[in-house]
Image: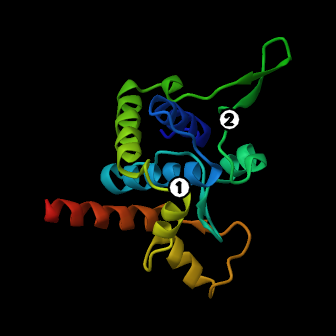
Amino acid sequence: MSFPPKAIANRFFDLAEADGEKLTPMKLQKLVYYSHGWMLGIRNRELIDEDIEAWKFGPVIRSLFREFADFGMNPITERATDMRLTDDFDWESTTPSIDEHDDPDEVDDAKALTLKVWKEYGSFSAIKLSKMTHKTGSPWDQIYQKYNCRLPDRAVIPNHLIRDYFAEMAKAEAASA
């Protein structure tokens, strides 16, 4: 079972806050993407329960884009939220968390993975992370090439492309260690 992207985003807000850092929408997108990619590549399991799309500046999770679009290139100042209908038929705002997941082993796995991604990529700028997602042969690049450099709206990057790419990166890292 995978997590809502907003729960993973909120995990990154916690990690960033603990280090005295702020996240912009673009940087957040890339951190969630890298986490999803590494989970697919290492564990062959999805981290998030939403498609990743190929947009001009790289992989994008639409729900996170909608949630934080108003921040533009500025640091995000609030956590991701959801609205849910209560038993009294009132709407209440909730803050998604990976701790709400049913499987404690998957929660621990997700926490460890996101911490590793934060330590590896958290110091990179949003622009650097975006450029990294544009590398020749990357999942984003494969979709970009598939559409002759004219990305249509909602061009999904299939999980199998992401999995294969990150699995190869994991093999290369293991071979060089």
Residue at x 38%, y 49% (from the top left corner): 39
Which residue, given by chain and number where applicable, does mark 2 sit on? 77
Report the amino acid beneath label 2: Thr
Q: Quadrant of residue 162?
A: bottom left
> Most extreme residue toward the bottom, as rendered?
148
Query: x%, y% of residue 139?
Result: 48, 70
Could you classify mark 1 by the number of other residues whose Cα lies within 10 Å: few (under 14), some (14-19), or many (20 or more)?
Answer: many
Query: x%, y% of residue 55?
Result: 65, 68
Q: Is residue 174 left or right of residue 52?
A: left
Of callouts 1 and 2, which one flags the residue occurring earlier in the amino acid sequence?
A: 1
Depth check: give the residue in front, 74 or 117: 74
Which residue, given by chain and number where applicable, does mark 1 sit on? 30
Of circles 1 and 2, the one toward us is 2
Depth check: give the residue in front, 131 or 101: 131
Q: Is residue 89 left or right of residue 173?
A: right
**Rendered image: mark on residue 41:** none
Q: Which element type, helix, strand or loop, lies under badge 2?
A: loop
Residue at x 66%, y 40% (from the top left corner): 76
Query: x%, y% of residue 65?
Result: 70, 51
**Which quadrant, please, contains the C terminus?**
bottom left
> Most extreme residue toward the top, as rendered?
88
Residue 170, compared with residue 85, is above or below; it is below
Report the amino acid beneath label 1: Lys
Residue at x 39%, y 24% (from the top left corner): 104
Could you classify mark 2 by the number of other residues whose Cα lies within 10 Å: few (under 14), some (14-19), or many (20 or more)?
Answer: few
> Most extreme residue toward the front, as rendered?
20
Q: How many marks?
A: 2
Query: x%, y% of residue 16?
Result: 49, 36
Residue at x 41%, y 52% (from the top left corner): 121
Q: Quadrant of residue 164?
A: bottom left
